[in-house]
Every structure is written in C-alpha cells, then in structure tokens.
Amino acid sequence: MTVPVTLEGARERRVRAGGVELCVAELGDPGQPTVILVHGYPDSKEVWSEVAPRLADRFHVVLYDVRGHGRSTAPKPLRGGFTLEKLTDDFLAVADAVSPDRPVHLVGHDWGSVQAWEFATIKRTEGRIASFTSMSGPSLDHFGHWINSRLKRPTPRRVGQLLGQGAKSWYVYLLHTPVLPELAWRGPLGKTWPRILERVEKVPGDGYPTPSLPTDAAHGAWLYRDNVRTRLRRPRPDAYAHAPVQLITPLGDAFLSERLYDELELWVPQLIRRTLPAKHWIPRSRPAQLASWITEFVTSVEGGRPESVTATGKYADRFGGQLVLVTGAGSGIGRATAYAFAEAGARVVAVDRDAEAAIRTAEMSRLIGAPEAWAETVDVSDEQAMEKLAAKVATEYGVVDVLVNNAGIGLSGSFFDTTPEDWKKVLDVNLWGVIHGCRLFGKQMAERGQGGHIVNTASAAAYQPSRALPAYSTSKAAVLMLSECLRAELAGQGIGVTAICPGLVNTNITSTAHFAGVDAEEEKRRQKKSARLYGLRNYPPEKVADAILRAVVRGEAVVPVTPEARGAYLMSRFTPRALRRIARLEPPL
Amino acid sequence: MTTAVTGELSVDSAELRGFRQVQQLAYACAEAVAARLEPGITEREAARMQREWLRERGVRDWFHLPFAWFGDRTAFVNFRIPLQFFPTNRRLEPGMPFILDMAPVYDGYTADIGYSGSLGINPVQDKLMADLEAHRELILREVRERRPLREIYEDVDRLMVRQGYANRHRAYPFGVIAHKIDRVKERRWSPHVFGFGTQSLKGLASDALHGHRDGWSPLWSPYRFSDHPPRPGLWAVEPHLGFRGTGAKFEEILVVTDSRDPEQSAFWLDDDLPHVRRWAEEK
C-alpha cells in the first residue's frame, strides 16, 4: 500500500464561499505572482502534487479542492449546487483571499479547465485573471458552438469529427444516469480506479488518487448533471476570453478530440498552442513539461509580452522549451537538425568534436528561435567523455526530451582493404557513439518517467547492401536494429525511438570519408569526386532535418529519407534479389 | 565598346574615377530607397523607386534594371527559373530582410551593386552581413595570389559551409559569384531585354567570345570555363549567403590589373561603402 500523496510544505486555510467551506493550500512566496491550480474530475487538488512544487520557487502557488471534493465541504442539496455560477463564486472567493490586489494566473486541468474557461470568459471576473493555461477541458460554450456548427453544415469530415468526439464522451452519458455512478464509485470502481489509471492512463502509481476518491467522484457527477446539458443546448454567444490563453493539448487523450480546439482562435485573441504526446492525466504523467510551459507563459505575460514565442517553426507547439541534444551538430544533417529544433523553439545542446563548429551551431540556433543553446565538444566514441557530458547536461540543462544520435563518419572500400583499425574507428563512432548516447541519455529519460524521444541516424546503407561500403553499412545496419530493439523496450515508458535512413544527402561526410586501400592522393581524388556526385544529387540536409522533426511528432519507427532511400527500402522488402544485384555494382568513383 | 586596357587601371586614373562615381551614386540610391521603405511596400514599388531615383539623376541605360527581394526571396527560396528574380507583389513586413540590387550606367560607366538590409531589426541578417566580411577579405587575398577563379569560388563555398550558410549566388545565371563589367557606349535609344541592357549584354557577349578563344570567361562561375587566373579588368563581385529563409549579399567592383605589385594587382574599387563602413564601426 503506497502512502497517499500530500502537498509538502503547503500552508492550508479554509475559505467560506456560498454555503461551502473550501480547503485552500498555498506554496511559495506570496509576494510573487499568484498561480491558481484547479483540478478536474475525479480528482482533488493533490493531482497537482508534482506540478505545484516545481512552480513554487518562482510563484505563489495556490490550490483548492473544488466544492464537494477532497477536504472542501459539499453543497446541500447536491443537485443545483455545482453550477458554473457557483463555481465562479468559489474561484472569486479564493482569488480574493489569496491575492486581493493582483490578478491571478489560472491553470486548469479537465473539469478545472472547463470551469476556468467560464471564469476567463465571463464579465464579472474581468481584471481578476492575468492568464489562463488550459489542459484537457474545453469551454462548454465553445463546445456547444462547435457541435452546432457541425450539425448545421454536416460535411463528411465534420460529421466524422462529431461522431469521434461523441464516442469519446461515453462516460458523460453514463454520469447522467441517476444513482448508478455513485454506487459504482463508492463500490468497486472506487477501489480499482488507481489501478485502471496506472494501466490504461500510464499514470505513475505513487499514492494518487487520495482516499477521498469515492466521495469526490460521487459528488463530482453533479458537475456534469448541473452544467453539460444546459450549456451545450444554449451556449453563450459572447464567450470571448479576456486574458491570454495557453492551450496544452495531450494528443493521446481518450476523452477529448484535439479537433475541439480547431476554431479556438475565434474566441481567444491571444492564444498559444502546445501539444504533448501523452494521455489525459498530464499533471501526473508530464509534470516537468507542464511546469516549464506554465513558468514560461506566466513569466512572459507578467513581462507584458503575451506572445513571447519567437519560434516560427512548424512544430513550435510541440517542441517549444524542450531540451534537444544533437550529436554531430557541427555540420551536415546534425547542424540542420539543431537549427530545425531551434526554429521550433527548443533549447538546443549542440555536440560535436569540432569545438568551433559546435559553438557556431549554438550561436546560430539562438538567433533563429532557441531560447537557450549550448555547445559541447565531445567525441561520441569516447565513453568517459560521453559519461561526463551526460552528467553535465543532467545537472546544468536538465533531462533531454529529444536525443538525436547523429554523429557518424564514412568509410568506403573493399572488405579486404578495410583494416581492423578502420573497422574499429567506424564502429566506434557510428555504433558505439549511438550506444553511449542511448545508454546515458536514454537512461535519464527512462528514470524521469515523463516520456521523450530518441532519434538515431542510420542510413539507407543499413538495408541496402553494397560492395563499396561493407564497414559503413554494417555499422548503420546495427544502428537500425538497435533502434528497433530499443523502441520495443522503451515503448511502455512513453519514449519513442526512430531510425532515420537518409540516402545521398549533400553533406561533408563525403569529403571526410576514409577510402580504404588507396593512397592519400587517390583518397583525396575520390573524396572530391564523391563530394561532386553528392553535390549534383544536391539533396539538402534541411529536408532530412524536417523529416526528423516530423518523425518525432508522429512517433515513426523507421524513416527512409530521399527517393532512393525509400525505393531501396521497398526493394529490400519486396524484391531483395534485385537489391543484391545492385549491390554488386562498382560505384563510379 | 572600349575594352579595359590594363595599364590604365591605376588607382587614380580618370577611368576608375568614373566607375567610382557611378558606384557611389548607386549605393546612395540604395540607401535613399532603403530609408523610404515601409511596411506594405511591394518589391515592384521598391524597384520602381530605385529606377526613378536614378533616372532623376541622369541614368539613361542599365547593365540590368533594379531588382528588389523581400523576405525569404532574399535567400532565393524555391527559385527554379530566372524569371523569379524579377520583382513581385510581395509586401514588406516589419523585421523582414530585403536586398536591393541595381546596375546603372552613368556617363558610359557601369556599376553593379547589392545592398542588404531589413525593416527594423533582423538579427539573422545582421549576422550574415557581419560574416560576409571574411568573404570580401578571402576573395581579394586569393585574387592577389592569382589563384584560378574556379578555385577561389570553391574556397568561398567552403568558408560558407564552415559558417553554416548556403551558397545562394549559385542561383544566379551560370551560378556566378562575379561577372565582368565595362564601359558602355551611350546611345540615344538603349533598350533592354529581360531586364538587361542590350549594350551591356553586347559587351559581355563580345568578352565571352574573345575569352572563349583565349581560354577565359567574363563569368566567374564554378564551372570549367572559369578555371583560369583572374583576368585584368573590372569585376562586379557578389557573394550571396543564405540561411533558412534569410539572405544577404554585397556587390561591388573589384579591380584586377596586370601589375606585378600584389597591392596594385587587385583592389576593391572603393572602400567607402555602407557595408565596409559598418564593419569598421563594429570594430
């Protein structure tokens, strides 16, 4: 039996509002901007137990149990006691008690967010709310308009969206049946719920939910019964937000479709979107990410610049503020990848053995949107150096959210010309570099338990045999299989692994490649010739970087980039004999 | 058509004074027009402003008509055909980079200049401009060493890659980083085709023909026909850097002579130009 979670170091007080007594907890310095966290259903304020302490050193953090939940008292009678008007009274009472002079920053999850949308869009709270961070809880008014617009003009796509959300809302219908939900929650469901959360929702089993769950859930059913039907039938026509809103959408939410927020710009003049590959209970499963986004948003609003995000990249909603480490970031695909992440607003650690090039990448990353970027000079094949790097990154910059093991070197030449030293060198960098990266940074990710993604740069040579590249292809095939195995192992922890397989990409790998079995002059000539061929092919590394970001967003497993790589990938699966024929050809060098 | 006679190209010759004067005029035009750019102006309007400014000051003929590129068009993003160089209805927005490029003929002397700037602050373009200084030094140094033009081109390329930039002069016709310019006979009627003055094109064509016989080319390109030491004359040099949708270039005249003194064998026509002053100020 795990110990129920508590909010350590919280100062508690009781606030009276409209016939109930609310249990309010405070953390942090009351002189700082106030952030009020509102929990959802079936939850209590302890749902924020991982998020609140992370915010407490910067802000005055306030949590309260919604009426009828946790240690707040329930209204009598229950019916009609949970309307949004009454919930607004509660919020205003709490806000006036904890921050009488300054507007507060609201953060809501699930039903907390549904309520907070009401607070942020009605007249009588104007001037009391500085900003609002919404997760997994739409405004019932917006939702009503969303349904109406789809019923009025039912194109096939819109009907699909309607049916999709309709199916996800099954529990809402159940909660409208009388008595049964209460019986279930006070009976078997209340007992098994923590295990269901762990198993289905991937919430860590750490003493949450609290023992008050059965009563919370039984009382909370009235949230639905008192509000959903009336609001969806007659949504307010003037539900415009009077504060900047940050919308955090978990993409794996089983209860809410991300399409719900498609027209949100109509209602919110200042909207910042964030997406997260996670399930519904993000305050439990992704507290670090939430804390960093809330901190960034609140700080920017306090600083008077609501749209602080300078990142213009396509995936800024996903990578904004995340920590991305790229090896081999001094040139080619690595550098382009670092820049693409920087454009998406990520914090970038550029690792390369060429110090000057890494510094350059970090410097340019900051110019194009990375809030922070650092250069680290490390040879990925050096185990101790990599361990030192991992320790330094963890203490100084944090746990890496996206790791790109990209550093690699080229080696060409017949198998019999390839010396053991050549083999060692190419395997050290191309394979061991990836192993060290996955081992050290992957471990940090897994230990944090809040997801992440690993991208390994393999190559089309991983599945396309060639007489010219025995050692290189071997190393890359190993990387490909390593990625697949690791993907299987880490799948349960929300960490994705992707192998990128580029074909001929115009980078300097050709001019630094080693050609086994020829003298220096001939090597130089071949380097030049292959660089020229790759130059004529002229496939830019920026496109590979785009493919990497897309692969992370979509969680793809194996991604061939360039038409020749995709062609070879298909051939390796359907016409492997033809591919073996091609492998016999001598490249024109 | 007068061919630049090499002996005449000493620093203070009347010949160079003429070129210097028109280059100053062109840069003055660029600065004047750049100062008048505001949000909402289109590339076409910016090009027309340059044209009118220069016409008012006596320019009658062009090596090429003024160009203006805004936003990611400064880096020639997705340029496939040369027609895309011509000004479009793209509107200028705050923070956008722009490039003005013009080549007026005044009193028979030609200039070809490029001016990069941005509406408000654009840190990326500032960085690109700052990094162009190394290219100006590299080009002069290697021309003085009489290295084949093609090799210098490749060295510029390598420097760009090291800086993390893309080579965007590659998008110009024949991928040139520079081309020869010369004096042009003034005629009463000076038509232009596809934006290029016929008189200047004639000069370039005749140079190309002579050069083809003698193994040199008036176009400084990455191709084999540029595999020769720098040819005496005036070269309009235009290294153009691109970085993720932002481009920057300068363009100015490099004088190459057949003098044995390295200092005299090649020099920039004029150091009193906006980008050079800027670099000096930053130091």
Image: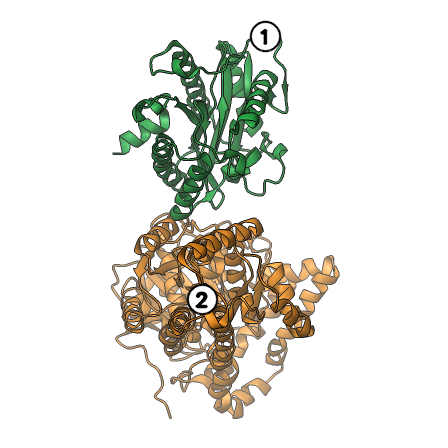
Chain colours: A orange, B green
| Mark 1 secondary-structure assignment | loop
Choose between A213 and A271: the one closer to the eye. Answer: A271
Q: Nearer the viewer, mark 2 or mark 1?
A: 1
Q: Which residue is mark 2?
A: A108
Q: Quadrant of the N terminus of chain A?
A: bottom left
Is residue A341 shown to the viewer in this render? no
- Amino acid on which disc 2 is placed: Gly
Numbered badge on residue A411: none
Choose between B172 and B119: the one closer to the eye. Answer: B172
Does residue A429 lie above or below B102 as drawn? below
Numbered badge on residue B187: 1
The answer to which quarter of the image holds residue A578 is bottom right
Taking the view exactly as shown, the residue that stands out farthest to the top is: B188
x and y percentages locating residue A473 in the rendered image: 51, 70
Numbered circles on residues, count: 2
x and y percentages locating residue B69 in the rendered image: 52, 32
Q: Quadrant of the C terminus of chain A?
A: bottom right
x and y percentages locating residue A103 in the rendered image: 36, 55
Cα gap from disc 2 to disc 1, whole angstroms:
76 Å
Choose between A331 and A232: the one closer to the eye. Answer: A331
Query: Is the C-beta separation of discs 2 and 1 under 8 Å?
Result: no
Q: Residue at x 43, y 75 (%)?
A: A285
Does residue B239 lie above or below A242 as drawn? above
Same chain for labels 2 and 1? Say yes or no: no
| Mark 2 secondary-structure assignment | strand
Is residue A415 shown to the viewer in this render? yes
